[in-house]
Amino acid sequence: MRIAFDEVLVAVGRIANTAGYGLEELGIGTTKARTVETDEYLQTLYPNIYAAGDVAGPFQFTHTAAHQAWYAAVNALFGGFRRFKADYRVIPWTTFTEPEVARVGLNEQEAKEKNVAHEVTVYGIDDLDRAIADEEAHGFVKVLTAPGTDRILGVTVAGAHAGDLLAEYVLAMKNGIGLNKILGTIHTYPTMAEGQQVRRRRLEARHGHAGPVGVPRSLPGLAARRARHRRGARPGARAAHRQAQGLRADES
């Protein structure tokens, strides 16, 4: 197979620039990835030397560096009173190609390799009115949830503004917000984020209900039972109501 091209970009990764800072003289070691060895508080073997960003790893993202900087600064200044472990539980990734590819948590391949049980909900961005209007109607949003629940295990977005669309899911995973609450939130039309409403309808169709916006998955059954109760639980009251209507009709 031959592919014509003008230029080729070979991205082989980066390594931390730790040379020339006297780390060896101080006895501060580096890892196999050539990042500075720190503890979970980002402190080196010296209590007054901390590391953050690419030199500390494990991620080489600007947003992760800023995240680490907060922990390093607070622990360095107030470590005598209280220290905070750097939190890497929910780290978003975005590759700024065209189209963009963004992800957080597990993707489908990782879930299969790790034998993590999951359900997959996919929505095509080509079905989104804003994307059609902007002539960017391509890509998808793929959400992995734990079977039988709305707990989000991971999200992958491919398409225009994928990194922006991912932010809502990052917030949800960070704060333990289930997928139903995201899908039950009204989003402005027409926007890229409005695709959540379509995803909600598809998820409901798959699970056999179509409750109103904001109603958790467990409630439509309750609503149906209440509706049946209103229709059939009080036949006497319903008969009395019909009789009263008939009397009013006769009087007229």
Image (spheres, rainbow, N blue to C red):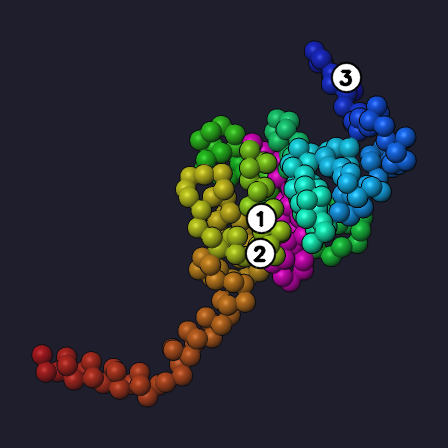
Q: Secondary structure at mark 3?
A: loop
Identify the residue position indicated by label 2 in the image.
Answer: 177
Q: Quadrant of residue 64?
A: top right
132 or 94: nearer the viewer? 94
Identify the residue position indicated by label 1 in the image.
Answer: 171
229 or 9: nearer the viewer? 9
Could you tell me residue 69's position as x and y percent?
Answer: 67, 39
Q: Amino acid at mark 3?
A: Arg
Q: Secondary structure at mark 1?
A: helix
Q: Is residue 145 left or right of residue 180?
A: right
Of labels 1 and 2, earlier in sequence is: 1
State whether residue 115 appears in this view.
yes
Could you tell me residue 142's position as x and y percent?
Answer: 63, 45
- Say few, some or many: other residues with alpha carbon within 10 Å of mark 3 (under 14 / 14 to 19 / 20 or more): few
Q: Nearer the viewer, mark 3 or mark 2?
A: 2
Of labels 1 and 3, earlier in sequence is: 3
Could you tell me residue 38's position as x and y percent?
Answer: 81, 42
Q: Quadrant of the C terminus?
A: bottom left
Q: Quadrant of the N terminus?
A: top right
Query: Which range of residues does the magenta coloring cover?
Result: 142-160
State whether residue 139 appears in this view.
no
Q: Are marks 1 and 2 in contact (CB under 8 Å)?
A: yes
Q: Give the CA separation, mark 1 to mark 2.
A: 8 Å
Q: Give the CA separation, mark 3 to mark 2.
A: 47 Å
Q: Amino acid at mark 1?
A: Leu
Identify the residue position indicated by label 3 in the image.
Answer: 2
Of labels 3 and 2, earlier in sequence is: 3
Q: Secondary structure at mark 2?
A: loop
Specify whether residue 7 is painted magenta. Answer: no
* x 53%, y 49%: residue: 199
